[in-house]
Amino acid sequence: MVKSTAFGTSLLISGPEDLLAERAVDERIVLAQHEHPDAELHRVQALGLEGNTFAELAGCSLFATSTVLIVSDLAELSPDLFDVVLATAIDPAPDLALILVHNGGMKGNRLLDQLKKAGIEMQRAATLKTWELPQFVFAEARRQHLSLTDRAGAELVAAVGSNLRALAAALTQLASDSDGEITEALIAKYFGGRAETTSFAVCDALLEGHTNKALETLRWALDTGVPHVLITSALAANLRSLGKFYDLRSSRMQNSDLARAVGVPPFKVKDLSRRAQHFTPHGVGVALRSVAEADAAIKGASSDPGFALERMVLAVDAALRAP
């Protein structure tokens, strides 16, 4: 439910994802300042906060009609202040907008539980699961008024990783060199040299049946210093996803639920479904064993890790092509 007023209310933001927490704080501040542009804004750290200081700030200034008070790192709040903060959060003054930010750890959980039981409005800033990252990218693209395809969104996640701040910054960078449409080609131009992107390129070529392209990409990756372990980890992750898909495809799940159960973005379900028509569960199992052997080789069991990876590509190709 959208709040009609920020004042006389309390908001608890809980979770370790800093970017989401910051945005939740900013949204409440914007709401408050839209309502009362002259509101005093106070940001304080819970660590070292004294009861008199909190009471003074929460009681609002004689010289201001309203106050926005943000208490960060609530986990560091002294237990001596738990009761006064809880009482203020439950019944804030009509001219107070109180925002409490907790990083989601175990410290300070007693106060956190009491705030939740009291029914304080709460927003989560939880770390996103792998399959949720493309959803964040698409939402961020809309936020920046950009057009982004499913495939391009997945490519960006593969290139940049799981850090939300880095993903948002990457979209901003891409936007400055585009007409508002973010394509796979543009992402490759900016991030194609990244190790994560190259490792997944090897994997995609191999699983699409393009063995020669996979070998060519592998050799280029090794020549440019891509860590060997990223190649095996990317291939193992994709094969495990395919194995999970085999186990779940007869469950009649919706694609979104199936993607969540397998641990992939929703658009990847189409890729898995297509590949599952050409491979067999037994072949995937044999391929995984080949990847495990290559992983052991590059971690010390072989004097030539590059050759071990080339042999792995051929072994995986043979396993997946077997009837």
Image (cartoon, rainbow, N blue to C red):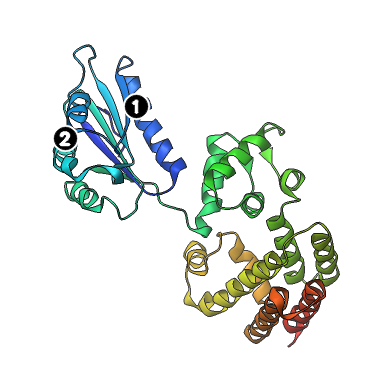
Q: Quadrant of the N terminus?
A: top left
Q: Amino acid at mark 1?
A: Leu
Residue at x-position 60% and y-position 52% = 161
Residue named by callout 2: 88
The residue that disc 1 covers is 31
Mark 1 neighbour class, 10 Å CA radius: few under 14, some 14 to 19, many 20 or more: some
Relative side of 139 to 148, left or right: left
Which amino acid type is marked by label 2?
Answer: Thr
Q: Secondary structure at mark 2?
A: helix
Looking at the image, is mark 2 or mark 1 earlier in the sequence?
1
Q: In the rendered image, is residue 40 in sight?
A: yes
Image point (71%, 67%), residue name: 231
Disc 2 or disc 1, which is closer to the eye?
A: 2
Vertical position of residue 53 compared to residue 186: above or below: above
**Farthest residue, direction front:** 48
Query: With 97 as the anchor, is 283 left or right in this view?
Result: right
Question: Tag 1, which secondary structure?
Answer: helix
Q: Residue at x 72, y 33 (%)?
A: 177
Q: Are marks 2 and 1 in contact (CB under 8 Å)?
A: no
Coordinates of residue 221 in the picture (x, y in percent):
79, 60
The vertical placement of 119 against 209, above or below, is above
Quadrant assignment, res 93: top left
Task: Judge by depth and name the residue closer to the eye, 270 or 27.
Answer: 27
Mark number, residue 221: none
Residue 68 located left or right of residue 186? left
3D distance between C-alphas at marks 2 and 1: 20 Å
